[in-house]
Amino acid sequence: MKTEIVELEKINLKNPILIEGLPGIGLIGKIAVEYLISELKTKKFAELYSPHFPHQAIIEKDSSLRLVRDEFYYYKGEKDLIILTGDTQVHPADSYGHYEVVQKILDFSEKYDVKEIYTLGGYSSGGKEVKEPRVLASGTDQEIIKRVSSIDSKLIFREDIGAAIVGASGLLLAIGRLRNFRGLCLLGESSGFVIDPKAAKSVLHCLNKILGIDISLEGLEKKIKENEELIKKLQKFQEKTIKKEMFEEKNRGMEYIR
């Protein structure tokens, strides 16, 4: 088996924009694009398979099995879109696999005359709680950076020289730049410890403004509230664990006293 993209339907698009949101920190990119897929009522037209993906099968609702895969969806509108999401990314240790899969995605994008790419993901705050997630951005060239730099106060262009963007979100743009694609990477700020729909909403808010997609983000509010409740429960559990450990430490070695 080799890395390949299987087309399920032949489609015609006019200068489509590629939007990528694969699993990563807080599942931010995946949540964002899956919401986009749902709201825009897109249709799947291709699947990507690779031996560099995890060696496992996925069980479906009807008990059937399938390979791990990534998927391409399309939307025809004022701006045509190709949206990429899926089950997985290549393992971080498999550098060759990352390059192979990204090159295959770019080849496929060229076939449909894609010129711009937007990659969505998460940026870890190092475990610190993030109440109002910013969107940290970087781009392929100064022209696209200047074009969107003042579009929203949440959008912050990165100045941390030498920092790395790991996985497809970085490689699609870095390799894409060498192949005359242009684009932006939008990373939602997150603690990184839990699934983060709030950060996904911030990313979509900025993408909405950049592309003029104009979809409502209210549908994410339920997920955000559920996530906030989960965080509260985790914090309470953590506090109880710390208190228990402190009590045990305080009383350690006192067993001989009667």
Image (cartoon, rainbow, N blue to C red):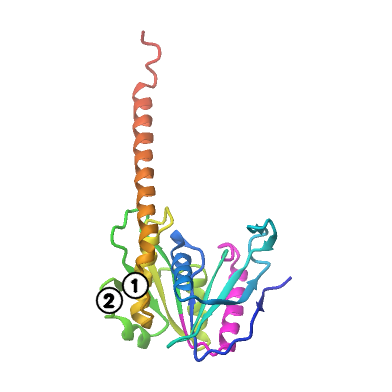
Which residue position holds label 2? 152
Residue 27 in view of the camera = yes
Q: At which x and y percent is residue 123?
A: 39, 64
Q: In this view, does 50 lie to the left or right of 21?
A: right
Q: What residue is drawn where x is 36% and y is 86%? A: 142
Which is more N-terminal, label 1 or label 2? 2
Q: Is mark 1 on a helix, strand or loop?
A: helix
Return the x and y of residue 214 as percentages of the image width and height. 36, 79
Judging depth in this view, the residue of 124 and 256 nearest the camera is 124
Amino acid type shown at disc 1: His
Magenta stretch: residue 255 in it? no
Furthest-top residue in view? 258
In the rendered view, tell whether residue 258 sits above or below residue 114: above
**Residue under the point 32% across and 82% down:** 148
With 132 as the anchor, is 14 left or right in this view?
right
Name the residue carrying label 1.
Answer: 205
Q: Give the range drawn in magenta.
A: 89-117
Q: In this view, does 149 lie above or below 52?
A: below
For label 2, the SS is loop
